[in-house]
Image (cartoon, grey):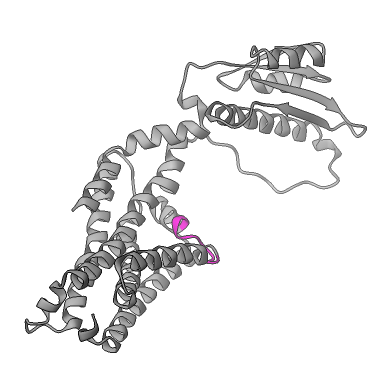
């Protein structure tokens, strides 16, 4: 119940998380904050024009490097952009920014967007030098950064968290039953060890898809459209069965709670590392189902996760058959 309460707390403050995280890579979301940057060097017009189109960024022109860097050192300018042209006419921009920090993160993001605009302008201006036409690029569209954050970060977080916590719950449940002696009391009943393990596995596995349905409903109430909710719930159920099955095997073979949680954590981290080798990361699979852009690979991976979940269940059954209840 405590784990569910923690997840509910995260879901309740999802809007706050969205605003906080999005502002880290979209400073416009903060609003009302102007940052002064010093510009010095040759051919500054292109850079100034791009910076003026960037909200929250104010450019100050300096005639000498000494004056520009002096303004930066005195704190009057947040950064220095120095422009030069090489022998081939390419525009080079050197950026001087403060050391690491939240303010530096916001500044770097704004400067990155400015430099991307400069790069685009330079490419368009030098298009006549191309010997052949490049591939056609789709027209740019205005999109809210909150949409990308919701589908690529928030949605996977809300769906994966219940599965991982369910695995941790089943580990603690089985190990505590054994350490406190209540598992031995359960053996007095007509239930076998396999029946007890199956009941715990089924209960903890069912928690994840139920919570996934609740989180998807909360997102729908907040205006977030999910294209394939049934597929996402099925994905969570498959991952939950896989993770809970892994946790159950660990709890049956580990000698104590500390080692069981350690083995479970290492196994989850290892599984996350292995998932990077897949044609599509699980988080991308969730995002594609949410956006309605699922491909054939996405559906095949859903089937793969379901197969692995079933395999984890049979691995639990095989482990139970090998374990002597008297040794637990």
Instruction: From the viewer's perspective, tell me whether residue 181 is left or right of residue 249.
Output: left
- Where 110 falls versus 195 (above or below)? above
Please name whichever residue, 7 or 22, is drawn nearer the observer in this view of the structure. Answer: 7
- Where 177 falls versus 82 (above or below)? below
Please name whichever residue, 137 or 188, is drawn nearer the observer in this view of the structure. Answer: 188
Magenta span covers which residues? 277-284
Determine the image quadrant of residue 68. Answer: top right
Residue 142 lies, in percent from the top left, at 51, 33
Task: Identify the residue at horizontal 61%, vertical 43% (top origin).
Answer: 138
Instruction: From the viewer's perspective, tell me whether residue 185 is left or right of residue 52.
Output: left
Determine the image quadrant of residue 279. Answer: bottom right
Please name whichever residue, 250 or 204, is drawn nearer the observer in this view of the structure. Answer: 250
- Where 223 falls versus 312 (above or below)? above
- Quarter of the image with the C terminus in it: bottom left
Residue 170 lies, in percent from the top left, at 25, 66
Residue 301 lies, in percent from the top left, at 44, 68
Determine the image quadrant of residue 174. Answer: bottom left
Residue 155 lies, in percent from the top left, at 37, 49
* Residue 78 on the magenta segment: no
Task: Identify the residue at horizontal 47%, vertical 31% (top origin).
Answer: 23
Please name whichever residue, 160 or 268, is drawn nearer the observer in this view of the structure. Answer: 268
Q: Main secondary structure of the magenta part?
A: loop
Is residue 144 something that shows in the picture?
Answer: no
- Where 275 falls versus 197 (above or below)? above
């Amino acid at each position: 119940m405590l784990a569910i309460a923690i997840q509910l707390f995260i879901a309740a403050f999802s809007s706050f998380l969205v605003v906080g995280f999005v502002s880290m890579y979209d400073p416009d979301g903060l609003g009302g904050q102007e940052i002064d940057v010093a510009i010095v060097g040759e051919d500054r017009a292109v850079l100034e024009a791009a910076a003026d189109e960037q909200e929250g960024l104010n450019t100050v022109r300096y005639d000498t490097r000494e004056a520009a860097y002096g303004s930066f050192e005195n704190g009057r300018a947040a950064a220095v952009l120095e422009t030069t042209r090489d022998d081939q006419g390419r525009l080079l921009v050197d950026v001087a920014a403060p050391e690491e920090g939240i303010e530096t993160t916001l500044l770097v993001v704004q400067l990155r967007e400015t430099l991307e605009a400069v790069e685009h302008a330079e490419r368009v201006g030098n298009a006549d030098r191309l010997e052949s036409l490049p591939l056609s690029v789709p027209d740019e569209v205005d999109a809210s950064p909150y949409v990308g954050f919701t589908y690529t970060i928030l949605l996977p977080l809300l769906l994966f968290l219940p599965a991982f916590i369910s695995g941790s719950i089943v580990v603690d449940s089985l190990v505590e039953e054994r350490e406190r002696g209540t598992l031995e009391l359960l053996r007095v009943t007509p239930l076998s060890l396999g029946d007890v393990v199956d009941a715990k596995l089924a209960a903890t596995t069912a928690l994840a898809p139920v919570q996934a349905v609740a989180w998807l409903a909360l997102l729908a109430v907040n205006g977030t459209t999910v294209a394939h909710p049934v597929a996402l719930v099925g994905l969570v159920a498959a991952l939950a069965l896989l993770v809970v099955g892994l946790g159950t095997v660990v709890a049956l073979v580990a000698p104590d709670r500390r080692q069981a949680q350690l083995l479970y954590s290492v196994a989850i981290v290892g599984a996350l590392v292995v998932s990077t080798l897949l044609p599509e990361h699980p988080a991308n699979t969730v995002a594609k189902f949410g956006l309605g852009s699922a491909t054939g690979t996405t559906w095949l991976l859903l089937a793969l996760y379901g197969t692995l979940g079933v395999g984890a269940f049979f691995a639990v059954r095989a482990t139970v058959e090998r374990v002597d209840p008297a040794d637990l």
